Amino acid sequence: MSSYPKIFRLRQTFEASRVDDLPKEVCAQLASLELDKKVAPNQTVAVTAGSRGISRIHVIIRAVVEHLKGLGARPFVVPAMGSHGGGTAEGQRQVIESYGVTEQFVGCPIRSSMETVVVCQTAEGFPVHFDRHAYQADHVLVVNRIKPHTRFTGDIESGLMKMMLIGLGKHNGAEVYHRAIHDYSFGQIIRSVVGEVLRKCHILAGLAIVENAYEQTALLEAVAPEDFETREKELLVLAKKWMPKLPFDRVDLLLIDRIGKNISGTGMDTNVVGRKFNDHRAIDGEFPKVKRIAIRGLTPETHGNAVGIGLSEFCKTSLLREADFKATRINVLTANQPSASMKPLDYDTDREILDVALSTVGLVEPPEAKILWIANTLELAEVECSAAYLDEARRRDDLEVLGELRDLPLDADGNLPDWEAWG
C-alpha cells in the first residue's frame, strides 16, 4: 500500500462575469468622463503599468493609449511598481514588456526611471514621492486592478489609490510608506498621501479593473479623481466576492507549483492560503487553515524575485537556484517584510518533501492526509485533491469531480510533473 493518498481532480464553479470586448469597453468607459474637456491637443498623459499579472493588461493599456491619441494627446507609459524589477529602471521596463506592454504594441513611448519628485510633506511629517516622468506630464491616468491586499485590511486595499502611493512613489516612496506603517495605519497613510497626490500631481482619471476567479476581466470602470475613494470601496467588495479560493477550509499540505510577483505581491496570495496576518498559520477566524505549504518553483514572469518563499515551510532546492535573492531582498526590505524572503527547508525531490511534510501535520496518517495541489494561487478553477476530500466534493453543487482516484504521479526520481502537464 502506498504511503501517500490517492488524488483526484476537481473543478470549481465561480462567478463568471466577463468583459468580452476590452478595447470597446475601455473606450466607452473613458468617453463617459468626457476627458476631451480636460485634455488639450498635444498635452502629455502618463499612463501607469504595474508589475502584477493582470489579464490582457497590454490590450487594456493599448486601448487607453488609443483613446488618448484620439483626443489629440501624447500619451506615454510609466512603469509604476515600487521596488519591483530589482529596483532599477531597466528592470521595471522589462517587467511590463514581459506582459506585452511594449512600445510597438501599445503605440507610445515607455519612460522608465527610478527618479522621484518630493511633492510635499504629509500632515504626519513624511515626504510624498512621485515618479519624475509622471510629475512632469500634463496629466496622469492611473490603471490598476482592484483586489484585496495581501497584508493590510480595510475598506481600501489594493487598487488605484495604492498605485498612486506605492507604484508612482517608486522605490523611494514605497520604502518611506512601508516604514510609516509601523506608526500609522495603512488607511491613514493611503488617504494622506493620495490626498496630496490628487491636489498636486495632475491626476486625470483612473481605470479600475476587477477580475473574476478565472483570471478574466470581469469589470472595467473609468473613475473621476474625486470619486476614487468612494468607488474603490465599492469595487473592493466585488473583488472580494469574485476572487478565487481553495475548495476546502482545512488543508494538511498545500503543494504550489509556482509563486511570483505576477501572481501576487507576496508571490502567493495570502488571502487564498490563509496567511495574511501570520506567516505560518491562520489566525482565529481566518480561513483556510493550511498546516504546511510546499513550493515547487517560480514563474518566469517574476524574473527570479522569490518573495513569498518565507511563508512556506518547504520548497524544492531547484527553486533556490532559480531565485535572484538580490532582487528579492530589495523587494522585501522595501516592503518592510524581511520574513517573506527567509528560506524554508529545501529538498531535491517532491518525494522527500512529501515524506517530511506529512510527518509534521499531526496524528493523521499520510494516506488519509488532506492534500491540495495547485498551479498557483490565481488559477484555482481546477485543483488536485487527495482522497480525504472526495465524499464532501461529491455532495457539493459548486464542485465537480473529474475522473477517478489515481496515484500521485511521482516519477522514478521522486518528482511530480508540472501541474499543468498532469490532467
Image (tube, rainbow, N blue to C red):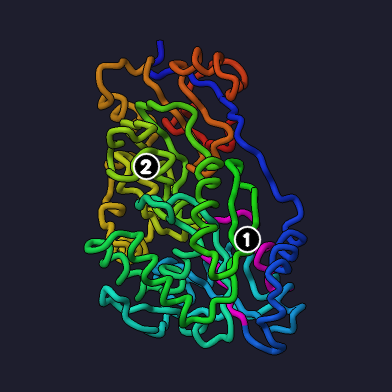
Task: Tell me which segment is drawn in magenta.
Answer: 45-66
Side of 322 relative to 44 (left or right)? left
Q: Which residue is mark 2?
A: 316
> Image height check: is 372 above or below 76?
above
Q: Earlier in the sequence, mark 2 or mark 1?
A: 1
Q: Residue 74, how many percent across, how many down?
A: 67, 84
Residue ID at (41%, 25%): 371
Taking depth in this image into account, of 138 and 166 the one nearest to the observer is: 138
Tell me the residue that label 1 is attached to: 57
Q: Secondary structure at mark 1?
A: helix
Q: CA distance from mark 2 to mark 1?
A: 31 Å
Name the residue at 39% across, 48% down.
319
As drawn, is 207 to the left or to the right of 120? right
Within-10-Å neighbours for mark 1: few <14, some 14–19, many 20+:
many
Residue 53 lies in the magenta stretch: yes
Seen from the viewer's position, the closer of residues 229 and 193 is 229
Mark 2, other Cα within 10 Å: few <14 / some 14–19 / many ≥20: many
Q: Residue furthest left?
A: 183
Q: Is residue 168 magenta?
A: no
Q: Amino acid at mark 1?
A: Ile
Disc 2, SS: strand
**Are discs 2 and 1 less than 8 Å apart at CB?**
no
Q: Quadrant of residue 40?
A: bottom right
Count of number-bearing discs:
2
- Mark 2 residue type: Lys
Q: Is residue 315 above or below residue 334?
A: above
The reply to whether residue 35 is in sight is yes
Quick one: quadrant of the N terminus?
A: top left
- Quarter of the C terminus within the rendering: top right
Residue at image x 46%, y 82%? 200
